[in-house]
Amino acid sequence: MTENIRAILVDWLVSIHAKFKLLPETLFITINLVDRFLSVAEISKDKIQLCGVAALLIATKYEEIYPPMIKDFIFVSNKAFTRENVLQMEREMIFALEFQICETSSFRFLERYWKIAKGDHVLFYLG
């Protein structure tokens, strides 16, 4: 996958994420799943969007209280694939990643760093 294709996919996922008003963590997990899956599996160019949808579906199930339904993901992708396609890609991703859905995220680091940095008790050493 080229940088441009990945950039288009991430941009599309960000817009879908915003459309459904999902949690920030969901987007981080989604991109992480896509990157990790594509590093261990080779998929054709025409299944890149399907990969993104499956990753978003997994991330919403993991992070959201009320995740969107599969039909919602199919609708926002202009019905480019079927429910069975989404479920098959979801299975492929989960098995390829050996059920390791979540890894340490930069989002959690930034979230904790922000909480610490807001406090008055933080001293920074400048060398």
Image (spheres, grey):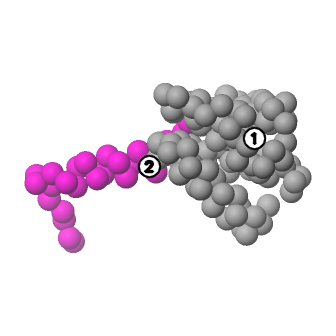
Residue 16, position in %: x, y?
Answer: 61, 50
Residue drawn at x 51%, y 42% as measured from the top left: 22
- Whether residue 98 sits left or right of residue 109 in the image: it is right
**What segment is highlighted magenta in the picture?**
102-127
Residue drawn at x 21%, y 71% as measured from the top left: 127
Query: Dots 2 and 1: beta carbons under 8 Å?
Result: no
- Give the residue number, with chain letter if any, for mark 1: 74
Residue 84, position in %: x, y?
Answer: 84, 30
* Kind of element beneath mark 2: helix
Residue drawn at x 70%, y 41% as measured from the top left: 73
The answer for how far apart the CA atoms under marks 2 and 1 are is 28 Å
Binning the other alpha carbons within 10 Å of mark 2 as few (below 14), some (14 to 19) or many (20 upward) gives some
Residue 41 appears in view:
no
Q: Is residue 92 above or below residue 77?
A: above
Residue 119, position in %: x, y?
Answer: 15, 51
Binning the other alpha carbons within 10 Å of mark 1 as few (below 14), some (14 to 19) or many (20 upward) gives some
- Give the residue number, with chain letter if any, for mark 2: 107
Q: Is residue 46 magenta?
A: no
* Front residue of 46 and 99: 46
Residue drawn at x 71%, y 33% as measured from the top left: 70
